[in-house]
Image: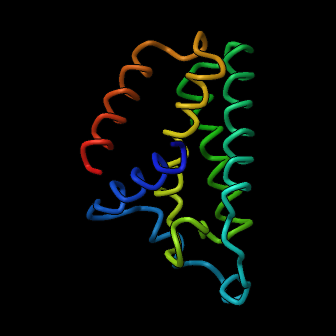
Amino acid sequence: MAISIFICSILLSSCKNSVSSESSQSNVSSINNEIKFIPASKEQMNLYRQIGVSYLCLARQAKVEFPQAISIASNNFVLLVSKKHGGLIEEIGDKKLTNDQIYQGSYLQLLEGAIQLCPDQVPEEDKTKFSQALEKLNQKE
């Protein structure tokens, strides 16, 4: 379920006319272009998700505001996938994802995980938004 949410949200975000993170990726040095990245496996993606959800729940218990906590957790997820795997995810195929696409997908995954693991730490408004986003994704399939 989480991976399908991730993939669907990536497909939705790839429909945008412009992605700001693509321009910053064009400035990557030639050294980084020579690195052969191995796509993140399903198991690795699950681990990164668990790390993000744990961080989000712990941050909320420490009274960090929800938008800041989920933003940091999502950005950490992006860093793991982009730096360790070059934006490649096994289940997506050979398509290299932008940081924005990874962020959008991780945001929904982490929100879903937090709703399951620490529902009292997720604002009702965000639970409602997640339910609505899930409905839209299910309609697209």
Q: Position of residue 83 (x, y in %)?
A: 71, 65
Between 115 and 100, the residue placed more toward the observer is 115
Q: Residue at x 67, y 18 (%)?
A: 60
- Viewer-side residue, 87 vs 32: 87
Q: Which residue is painted at 66% across and 71% down in the image?
A: 39
Q: Quadrant of residue 64?
A: top right
Give the side of residue 135 with respect to residue 98, left or right. Answer: left
Count all numbered tags in the image, as a single digit: 0
Residue at 53% over, 31% down = 112
Question: Does 31 appear above or below 12?
Answer: below
Q: Is residue 35 above or below residue 137?
A: below
Q: Position of residue 79 (x, y in %)?
A: 68, 56
95 on left or right of 73? left
Which of the colour schemes (rainbow, by chain, secondary structure, one colour) is used?
rainbow
Q: Is residue 137 above or below residue 82?
A: above
- Residue 118: x, y in percent? 64, 17
Residue 109 picture location, percent across and down: 54, 40
User: Which residue is outermost to the top?
Assistant: 120
Q: Looking at the rendering, which quadrant does residue 23 occupy?
A: bottom left
Q: Nearer the viewer, residue 16 or 45?
A: 45
The residue at the point 44 percent across, 20 percent down is 127
